[in-house]
Image: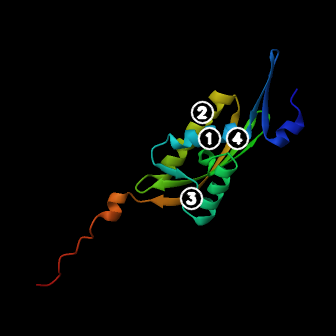
Amino acid sequence: MADPKDAQRGNSELVTKDGKTTISNEVVAKIVALATREIAGVHEMGSLGLGDALTGIAQRASKLGQSTQGVNVEVGEREVAVDIKIVVEYGVSIPQLTTAIRRNLATRVNTMTGLTVKEVNIDVTGLYFAEEAKDKPAERPEPRVA
């Protein structure tokens, strides 16, 4: 039987007659981050703000690395709740994108861990404009009078 203290520490246990398997929050967070990045239209995880840049530096220093930036998970014995922050590419339908992310996360997490994704909260923190759009010279409107 799973120890309630493990759930508090952020570990999920899969117990069988052959033994138990413990899955840490960090592993689930990495799966979530990779599954999110698989979806076209996600430019990056986290946000473009200074606070998240500092968080990213702290994560790299603590060996979590940038791979889980913008991801927070709460892992129980059978379920996981996910909070993610993303920057989306300009022109992408955000409702369609978030639906695709939720579907992919649920599939990947369940396939790899056996856990059920109970909820996925998505915070769209920024909008990315392609460099081409930034570097393109501004078109001058045609004069209205000659």
Residue at image mark 4: 26
Determine contact: label 1, label 2, CB under 8 Å.
yes
Q: Amino acid at mark 1?
A: Val
Q: CA distance from mark 4 to mark 2?
A: 15 Å
Q: Is residue 37 above or below residue 57?
A: above
Q: Nearer the viewer, mark 4 or mark 2?
A: 4
Residue ID at (84%, 42%): 8
- Quadrant of the drawing holding the C terminus: bottom left
What is the secondary structure assignment of the residue under circle 3? loop
Q: Quadrant of residue 24?
A: top right
Q: Amino acid at mark 3?
A: Ser
Residue ID at (70%, 49%): 62
Q: Amino acid at mark 4?
A: Glu
Q: Nearer the viewer, mark 3 or mark 2?
A: 3
Residue at image mark 3: 47
Residue 103 visible in the displayed image: no
Residue at image mark 2: 108
